[in-house]
Image (cartoon, rainbow, N blue to C red):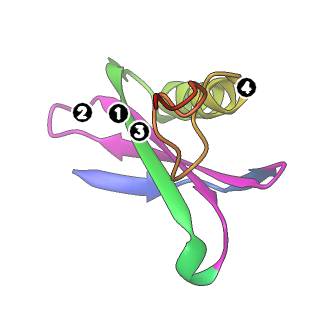
Amino acid sequence: MITIREPSFSVGKYLVSPLTTKTLAGDYAASVSIRSGHGSRTHDRVMRFLPLFATREGALRYAIQQGIHWLQQPSRAEPGATKDAHWPKKN
C-alpha cells in the first residue's frame, strides 16, 4: 500500500492534512490528520474512513470534507477534554 500525504491547509488553529492510500486491490482509502498546538503540547487526531474510492481524487475530496465537517461539530471535545466535560461534577 502506498500512502500519499496531500497538501495540508489551516482552518483556524488547526492544521488539516488529508491522506490517500492506494490499497493492494487498487482502490483508494481516505484519511485525515487534524493537528493543534505546538511543541510538547501538540495534539494530532487521525481518522481513517470507509468507503473505498475508485480514484485518488475521490478519496482526497472525501478526506477534506470529513476533516472540515469534524471541525465544524459544536459537540466535539477539545484535546484533553473528557466526553462529559460539560456536565457539572457530582458532590
Q: Residues within 10 Å of mark 2 (few under 14, many from 20)?
A: few
CA–CA distance between discs 3 and 4?
A: 15 Å
Alpha carbons under labels 1 and 2: distance apart:
10 Å
Proximity of marks 2 and 4: CB atoms separated by less than 8 Å: no
- The residue range painted magenta reads 11-38
Closer to the camera, 26 or 7? 7
20 lies above or below 61? below
Q: Nearer the viewer, mark 2 or mark 4?
A: 4
What residue is drawn where x is 66% and y is 56%?
Answer: 7
Out of 81 and 59, give the one closest to the viewer. 81
Q: Which type of secondary structure does the marked residue at label 2 adopt? A: loop
Residue 48 place in picture, x, y as percent = 36, 36
Indicate which disc residue 72 carries.
4
The residue pinned by badge 1 equals 29
Res 20 → quadrant: top left
Tell me the distance, in whole angstroms, between the alpha carbons under discs 1 and 4: 23 Å
Residue at numbered disc 3: 47
Mark earlier in primary sequence (3, 1) = 1
The residue at the far top in this view is 51
Residues tagged 1 and 4 counted as in contact (Cβ below 8 A) = no
Type of the residue with mark 4: Gln
For this view, does 51 lie left or right of residue 17?
left
**Label 1 close to label 2 by CB (< 8 Å):** no
- Is residue 63 inside the magenta stretch? no
